[in-house]
Image (tube, grey):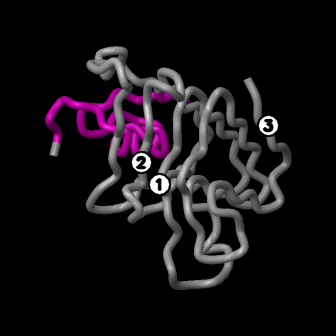
Amino acid sequence: MDDNLCTLREAILANNVNQAQNGCPNPNGTITFANSLLNSSVGETIIISNSPLPTITANVEILGLGSDKLTVNGNNQFRVFDISSNLKVTIAGLTIANGITPTDGNAFNQSGGGIRAGEETNLILRDSTLSGNNSGSDGGPSLWLSNGEQQHYGR
C-alpha cells in the first residue's frame, strides 16, 4: 500500500530493485533516516514486526542518526539484517538489537541474529552497536560473515 511514508522495509525494497517503491524514492544506494524521527531525548526504536525485513540484495549504505539515537530492534522474533553474497554494505549510526535467527535449517541459516552477511560480502560497521542478539548455532549471535572480504569495526 502506498501511504507516501517510507519505512525501512520499503527503503530496502526500493534499493534492491533500484526504483521508487510504495512512497519511497529510489535511494540510489544510500538509505538515510529523517531527523524528524528524533522526537525523544532517549532515542527512537524501529521494531520489526509481522515479518522479517527484506534481504538486502544490492549494494547499500544505511546511515542512521547515531547508535544512541536510533535502534533497529528484531523484537526477539526476527534477524535484523540479512545480506546476500558479493555485496558492499555499510551500516553506520545504528544500534542493532534483539535479533534472533530461525531455529530451523542448517548452521548458516541459524547464524547471525543481528546481521548475517553472505559469501564475499564487504561489510563495514561504523559507529554502531550490536546488542542482545541471539543465534541458534555456533555462528555468532550478533554477526555472521561467510568468507567476507573485509570486516571493519570502529569509529
Crowd class of label 1 (few under 14; some 14 to 19; many from 20; radius 10 Å): many
Q: Which residue is mark 3?
A: 152
Crowd class of label 2 (few under 14; some 14 to 19; many from 20; radius 10 Å): many
Mark 1 against mark 3, which lies toward the viewer? 1
Amino acid found under the numbered disc labelled 2: Asn
With 120 as the anchor, is 69 left or right in this view?
Answer: left
Q: Which element is circle 3 on? A: strand
Which quadrant would residue 34 be assigned to in this image? Answer: top left
Q: N-terminal of the two: label 3 or label 2? A: 2
Q: Which element is circle 1 on? A: loop
Q: Are marks 1 and 2 in contact (CB under 8 Å)?
A: yes
Where residue 27 sits: x, y (%)?
A: 45, 28
Q: What's the CA distance linking mark 1 and mark 3? A: 22 Å
Amino acid found under the numbered disc labelled 3: His
Q: Quadrant of the C terminus?
A: top right
Q: Which residues are magenta?
A: 2-31
Where residue 99 sits: x, y (%)?
A: 49, 57
Amino acid found under the numbered disc labelled 1: Asn
Q: Main secondary structure of the magenta part?
A: loop
Which quadrant would residue 107 be assigned to in this image? Answer: bottom right
Residue drawn at 76 percent across, 36 percent down: 153
Where residue 25 sits: x, y (%)?
A: 35, 27
Q: Which residue is mark 1?
A: 98
Q: Which residue is mark 2?
A: 73
In the picture, the disc for residue 150 is none
